[in-house]
Structures are given as C-alpha cells and as structure tokens.
Amino acid sequence: MTAVLQRTPASAETTTGPSESMHHVVIIGGGFGGLYAAKSLAKSPVKVTLIDKRNFHLFQPLLYQVATGGLSAGDISSPLRSVLSDQKNTRVLMGEVVRVNPKEQQVYLKNGEVVPYDSLIVATGVSHHYFGRDEWADIAPGMKTVEDALEVRRRIFLAFEAAEKETDLQKRKALQTFVVVGGGPTGVELAGALAELAFGTLKDDFRNIDTTQTKILLVEGLDRVLPPYPSELSAKAQKSLEKLGVTVQTQSLVTDIEGDNVTIKRGDQIENIQACTVLWAAGVKASPMGKAIADCTGAELDRVGRVMVEPDFSIKGYPNLYVVGDLAHYAHQDDRPLPGIAAVAMQQGEYIAKVICKRLTGEDLPAFVYKDKGSMAVIGRNAAVANIGTLKMWGFPAWLTWIIVHIYFLIEFDNKLLVLTQWAWNYFTRKRGVRLITGPDEIPAIADQVAREMETEPIKAKEMVNA
C-alpha cells in the first residue's frame, strides 16, 4: 500500500525556506548517506534541513593518510555550507541532535532548539567497537573522525621522537613497535602506510635510531586479511604487506592491552608483545542515535546497535522516518546486512531522496538494491587490490584505479586538486609533509606504565619496613 507523505500546515512550521507549505525533509548527519540524500533533493519540490554537529563533510576513506602524515585534515574535508550553497531549498544547521519525537515529528537539539519535519532521514554512522573492553579506547585509538586521525598521527610521530631520546634498548624497541588490530581495509591500509613511513620517509631523519628496525604487526582474528575479498586478493594483499616489512598474524586475537604490554592469543598460544603504540581497526558499533531511534519507535537493533529497517529504509510503523548508511541494518538483499562502506551509503542516500519525492505524488519505488561496483584497498606505493565485478586486479593497475576512484569521489574540486598534487609530490619525493605533532607530548602507554610503577613503589617500601 502506497504511503502518501503529508505536508505540514504553514501555522505549524517554524523553519525558514523557499515556501512555508513545502514538504520539510530533515537530515541528521552530513556523512555520505546524509550528504548524498541532500544533494539528490536539490531540484525537488521540498525544503531540506541538514543537521550535523560538525560543519564539514569528512572523506573517511582517506583518514589513514592524515594519520600517517600524507595529507592534512583540510585536504579531505569540505564545509557543508559550501557544498550545499547552490541549493536554495537547503539550509545547514550545526548542532547535535539528542532526541527524536516521531509522533510529533520533531527533532530536539542539544541547545534546546526544536526542528519539525515531514520526513526524517537519520544517517549518523558508527563509532569504534572494542567488544566489551571500552577501557582500551584511551590506549588503542581508532579512526572515525578528524580528531581520531590527528591523535593517531600524534602517537605515531611522538613514538619515533621518544625512541630517538631513549637510551634503554628494550624501551626503545617498544617505542618502535606498532600493533594494528584488525585486518580489514582500514587496518591493511594503515599498516601499509606505516611501513612506508618507517622504512622509507623517515629512514634518514634520525641519528640515534634506525627506523628500518621498526616492527609493525597486523593482527587479524580470521584466517586472512581483507576477509570480504576473494581469497586470491587477500593472499596478494598479505604478500604485498610482508614485502613492505609488515608482520601479518592471522587467526589471532588481542586479549589484553595494559601499558606497553599487548597480549595476543593464537589458538592455545599466548604471546606478550611490548608495544607503545596500538591502533584499532577491528570493529564498529552504531552511534547512540540508533538506540534513541529504537527507544522512541520500538525498532529492533542488531548486536552492534544498528537499526533494523524496512525494504525502503523506513522504520516499521513510521513510514516517514528513514535510517540509512552505516546505522542501518538492511538485510533485504541476499539475507545479510550490506557492508558499511561509502558506496553503500551514497546509493542509499540517493534512493531515499527518490522515495520521498515519489511518495509526495502517491507513488512507491521498488525495494532498494545495492549495485556493487567493486571494492579496493591500497597497500602502498604501486600496490593495491581491487575486486570489480568479475575483474580482479592487483599491483600497479589496481593502485592506479584506486587513485582515480578516490579523486573522483572527493566532494569539492579544490580537494581533488590538493590531494592529487600532494600524492604526486609524495610519490616522486617519497616524503610525507604533514608530520605535525600537536597536543600533549605524553605517550599513553608509557604514562600508564609509570603510574602502575608508582602505585607499586609504596607497597614495596612498606614491605621493606615490615621486613
């Protein structure tokens, strides 16, 4: 049965726009799903309000390059107001949504502002998942935001700086040991970039340490890296990583992280590794907005907090409330949820825009079908893997394809030009120019170790007195 979306009477509308009586679409989240929905509504007979707690869209697939000094944060960020400035039916609000009232059709912001809607699109994405060990978040940061990437960059370069000053060989070795947890695309790309940094870019920059002695360990719980990819490409990716100098350890789980000590379990074997830098790329969980939607609609959540949606991404019983992107658990294609990648969110955003416009005229669209245009991951210089339909590529052809695709999907032209120029410079000079250390000069693993040693000192002193 076709659901016809109603328009809000002018007396109930409090927002400004092209027309007070136009159907009001509110979008929460300026990521790929939300932004592509907004852009697709540019010429539609609706008014759009995009709400995000940040004033920019972030191209997350390249965050690892910010973390390893290859690009600056501004190169992969685009101001939302600038991106949508030509859409006269669209306004942007910088604010944090704390609650949704689907019965009254209102969105509540943290500052107390209330925004009414006729159709609501929620696209707030996911965050890191530590599988019940949230205390690891401080010592093993992931990468979902600009701040995350800058923190990872701080820790990476600070570790080398601390190693340069360290006279204790064992501590120096720990400072030059990096553990990347998770062998998916993010983990593989981060480990590869780290290897190029340590064994190439930095090798002549220090006097007391040899950066080519750096140890980079990639830990994956399954039997191969890049598990969603064909096994042939997984094997090529692992070979490329190992050629760069990365130690790949599959069928292994990190069971504890304490100070500079990382405990890894592989079968019945337990291994303790001293590493001052642990980087997390192992899992995701839904943003808090998923639970907020479930609480007010009764929607079901999956085990990581994603919202179970209908074939049109609406919530059961609420045909004008949609959840898209990484926050949505869409299991109406191949009986399994769609992958949490940018391409999926883009297509979903465009689909929801069409759904809303069709329903204004009393029509429906067929259920969403994701058109898989392929997946790819870069390992390093001239090395990548790509799975595009029946075509499988690796090495230089895959690497070149990866570059073209990522440049194409960057939002603004100046970002495309900046990134292309920076990549060309890095390629020919093997330099990474954005190696800034900002924030405190403290390494969490060392600080944690010192704190634990200080806690034990009074105990030892007391034991000596008693003796």
Image: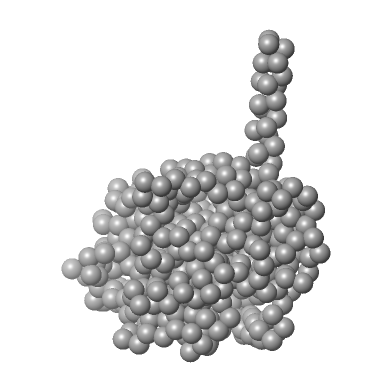
Q: Is residue 442 visible?
A: yes
Question: Does 14 appear above or below 167?
Answer: below
Please indicate whether residue 293 sits to the left or right of residue 156 in the image: left
Residue pictured at 78% horizontal, 69% vertical: 205
Q: Is residue 285 visible?
A: no
Quadrant placement of the N terminus: bottom left
Q: Quadrant of residue 78?
A: bottom right
Q: Tell me where residue 134 appears, x and y as whole percent.
A: 50, 43
284 or 296: nearer the eye?
A: 284
Residue pictured at 44% horizontal, 56% vertical: 283
Please indicate whether residue 289 sits to the left or right of residue 276 in the image: left
Q: Tell me where residue 212 appears, x and y as whole percent.
A: 67, 67
Question: Does 28 appear above or below 409?
Answer: above
Q: Tell me where residue 187 appears, x and y as whole percent.
A: 50, 64
137 or 366: nearer the eye?
A: 137
Q: Residue furthest left?
A: 1
